[in-house]
Amino acid sequence: MERADAARNRAALLAAATELIRERGIDAVSIDDVAAAAGVGKGTVFRRFGDKAGLTQAVVDSTAASWIKVASLECRTAAEFAGQLFDHVLASLPLVIAVERTSVRSCEGNFRLTVDRLARLVGSTFNAHALLAVLRGEQIAFLLDQGMTAAEIRAGVVSLADTLAAEV
């Protein structure tokens, strides 16, 4: 059983890391920043999570419920599901990018749920992966940096989903 002070420190570290990553993006957040924001020494972060990737993975694991909720929503069409996935990625963009950059394991269980669900809507696992490729945080950030609006990107994602589903 976890000691009460250790549980408090873990919760404080996860909350601080989540907030800092969302505000600044993963590249602008250090272990020192997270420790200071949580009110603990950086040694506590290293003992608890190992490194920045371990901390990021713990943040992802602790926030996975929101992804599962999106992936579990009732959607009648591929376009509707893809639009909801886009909205979720956009709302969590810095955190999604952090996962993409720092974690090999990423959100495998949640990702598998998403792929399986999407494959049923677009006709194949390949089509599901093709659609998910444009929903990567890095891709969306790139398109935003190129001057596209979120509404334009979302419309493109929805259109692609419609096109892939039409082939089913």
Image: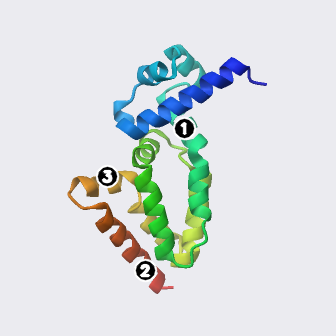
Instruction: Describe the element under mark 3 as helix, strand or loop.
Output: helix
Residue kind at label 3, given as amino acid type: Ala
Residue occupied by mark 2 = 162
Is residue 19 positioned above or below 167 on the image?
Answer: above
Q: Earlier in the sequence, mark 1 or mark 3?
A: 1
Mark positioned earlier in the residue sequence (2 or 3) = 3
Left or right of 30 in this view: 51: right
In this figure, what is the number of numbered marks?
A: 3
The reply to whether callout 2 and callout 1 are in contact (CB within 8 Å) is no
Disc 1 secondary structure class: helix
Q: Which amino acid does label 2 sit on?
A: Asp
Q: Which of marks 2 and 1 is nearer the N terminus?
A: 1
Identify which residue is drawn at 29% across, 67% down: 152
Instruction: Determine whether, in the image, residue 22 is placed left or right of residue 9.
Output: left
Distance from Cα at disc 2 to Cα at disc 3: 23 Å
Q: What residue type is labelled 1?
A: Val
